């Protein structure tokens, strides 16, 4: 049985520092643009009247919004919790071992069980709908209409499932895939130890491999461009959706991890500085929101911005 301190050390080494070893550049077709250097404003918290802190469990990492409620994975208690927009815990449900990534829509919640090599499907009421085998080390989950995509960090692959859990394909990608997004047609994959992102067709064909920064960790599509966080480079890159070329590179704080879109803003979780950087789509940095210890994931809901704090076992609304 691990002590709390041992579990926290394991979380850091597993989820973050593992990316430091064996980082290898790959040949890519991207063009590199110069870094932008916007001026930051003084760090500030959001309106304190709307701030909420909720005890989430042991090692909260992934977070998703189903349109009504927030779902959070607790890596060390093998559970997910369901939380209302005002911070009330509505339920706690058992899943597989070391749940990390999570995705949700209006009908189901999918959880990546990193140590089980499975994904769990729940109803939005928390009922177990199925458990399905995927690749080695499932880390991230993406729902695209009728399909579920899973990034398998230890087998350097992406698995495609039907919404019923049927295996539709397994596709090789770069070294340690940890994040997924879609541009509406294609699937984008962040290869954390390959310092690259890949674009796949809906059929799993590789359409491009593009060099990014050191330790790509999070991905999001803003409707025009793809954004990627670089954990060890303290930066975010904005990529052209059509050819992967670098449109902009923006400096953020230490340990750029989760990323999300909120209207015209890009939100970047800074794991090493316990904060969220708020960017404009032009790359300007104009605010910093303080959150809990070792923040990891982020979701935008109708009730605010929610962040998982893996080091303080909480989630923050800002």
Image (cartoon, rainbow, N blue to C red):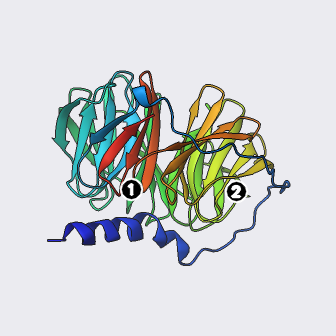
Q: Can the viewer see residue 51 in this picture?
A: yes
Judge left or right: residue 317 versus residue 278.
left
What residue would you read off at disc 2?
A: 209
**Residue at screen point 37% across, 33% down:** 163
Judge left or right: residue 4 versus residue 189.
left
Residue 286, quarter of the rendered image: top right
**Residue at screen point 24% across, 54% down:** 58
Residue 67, quarter of the rendered image: top left
Q: Residues within 10 Å of mark 1 (few under 14, many from 20)?
A: many
From the viewer's side, name the closer residue of 311 and 129.
Answer: 311
Which quadrant does the N terminus fall into? bottom left
Query: Extreme left residue here?
Result: 1
> Can you give x and y, in whole percent of width and height, for residue 81 in the image?
24, 39
Tell me: residue 29, above or below residue 261: below
Residue 238, quarter of the rendered image: top right
Query: Extreme bottom residue here?
Result: 22
**Residue at screen point 35% across, 58% down:** 311
């Amino acid at each position: 049985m691990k002590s709390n301190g041992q579990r926290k050390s394991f979380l850091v080494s597993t989820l973050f520092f593992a990316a430091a070893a064996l980082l290898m550049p790959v040949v890519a077709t991207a063009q590199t643009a110069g870094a932008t250097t916007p001026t930051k404003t003084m760090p500030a918290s959001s309106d304190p009247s709307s701030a909420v802190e909720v005890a989430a469990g042991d090692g909260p990492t992934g977070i998703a919004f189903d349109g009504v409620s927030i779902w959070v994975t607790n890596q060390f208690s093998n559970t997910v919790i369901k939380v209302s927009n005002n911070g009330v815990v509505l339920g706690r449900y058992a899943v597989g071992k070391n749940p990390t990534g999570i995705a949700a829509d209006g009908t189901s919640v999918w959880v990546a069980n990193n140590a089980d090599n499975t994904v769990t499907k729940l109803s939005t009421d928390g009922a177990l709908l199925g458990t399905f085998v995927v690749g080695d080390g499932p880390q991230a989950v993406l729902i695209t209409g009728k399909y579920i995509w899973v990034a398998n960090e230890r087998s350097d692959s992406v698995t495609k499932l039907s919404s019923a859990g049927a295996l539709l394909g397994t596709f090789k990608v770069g070294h340690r895939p940890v994040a997924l997004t879609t541009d509406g047609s294609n699937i984008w994959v962040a290869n954390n130890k390959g310092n690259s992102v890949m674009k796949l067709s809906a059929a799993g064909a590789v359409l491009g491999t593009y060099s990014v920064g050191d330790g790509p960790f999070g991905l999001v599509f803003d409707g025009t461009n793809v954004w990627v966080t670089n954990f060890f480079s303290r930066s975010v890159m904005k990529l052209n959706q059509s050819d992967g070329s670098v449109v902009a590179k923006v400096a953020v704080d230490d340990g750029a991890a989760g990323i999300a879109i909120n209207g015209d803003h890009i939100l970047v979780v800074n794991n090493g500085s316990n904060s969220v950087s708020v960017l404009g789509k032009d790359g300007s940095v104009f605010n910093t929101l303080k959150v809990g210890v070792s923040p990891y994931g982020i979701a935008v809901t109708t009730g605010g911005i929610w962040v998982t704090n893996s080091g303080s076992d909480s989630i923050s609304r800002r």
